Image: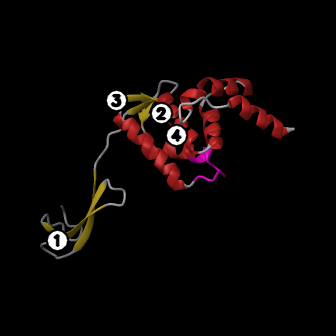
């Protein structure tokens, strides 16, 4: 490690701690030449796969973009930033666990939809309505009905028809 004060290459480690996230190590070091003290942070460099967009473009996976989408869906909902970041962590781990070098944006979006469905129904509907391109409300509702069982947290079909009736009842 190069000393930030004098540039000397030799130091000694005074203290080592695991970071708050559990994925990093903080080390307090002391330069053997100038006796200056500094802290280093060691993290594992993770190489995320590329995301294949709907139009065929490829771009690196971005945790920030996933978080922005989730934040937009959870706006004015009782969902904390920590909960949103946990979803991003789970999605990122899922992307890393796949053996492919490229992952479709559709598969990432479906993973986010599934995670949001477990967290907040309104955020789930918001994200799904923006993420999918629907011509009208009926197409959106039929899509939800088709995928209700797959997106259900406990594997049981959701009662979409009952939800539709209660929403229509509230509109009257």
Give the position of the C terminus as an image quadrant. Answer: top right
Q: CA distance from mark 3 to mark 1?
A: 41 Å
Give the position of the N terminus as an image quadrant. Answer: bottom left
Q: Is residue 3 above or below residue 122?
A: below
Q: CA distance from mark 4 to mark 1?
A: 47 Å
Q: CA distance from mark 2 to mark 4?
A: 11 Å
Residue identified by numbered label 3: 101
Q: Is residue 127 above or below residue 82?
A: above
At 36% from the left and 34% from the top, the residue drawn is 49
Based on the picture, tell me whether residue 72 belongs to the magenta stretch.
yes
Which tag is nearer the camera, tag 3 or tag 1?
Answer: 3
Q: CA distance from mark 2 to mark 3?
A: 14 Å
Residue identified by numbered label 2: 108
Q: Residues within 10 Å of mark 1 (few under 14, many from 20)?
A: many
Residue identified by numbered label 1: 31
Q: Element under label 2?
A: helix
């Amino acid at each position: 490690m190069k000393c930030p004060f004098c540039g000397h290459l030799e130091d000694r480690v005074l203290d080592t701690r695991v970071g708050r996230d559990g994925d990093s190590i903080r080390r307090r070091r002391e330069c053997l030449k100038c006796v200056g003290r500094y802290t280093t942070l060691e993290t594992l460099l993770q190489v995320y796969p590329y995301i294949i967009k709907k139009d065929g473009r490829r771009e690196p996976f971005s945790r920030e973009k996933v978080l922005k989408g989730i934040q937009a869906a959870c706006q004015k909902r009782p969902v904390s930033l920590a909960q949103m970041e946990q979803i991003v962590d789970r999605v990122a781990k899922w992307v890393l666990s796949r053996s492919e070098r490229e992952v479709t944006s559709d598969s990432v979006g479906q993973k986010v939809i599934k995670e949001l469905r477990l967290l907040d129904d309104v955020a789930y509907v918001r994200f799904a309505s923006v993420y999918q391109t629907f011509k009208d409300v009926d197409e959106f509702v039929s899509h939800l009905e088709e995928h209700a069982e797959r997106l259900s947290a406990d594997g049981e079909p959701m009662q979409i028809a009952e939800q539709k009736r209660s929403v229509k009842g509230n509109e009257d």
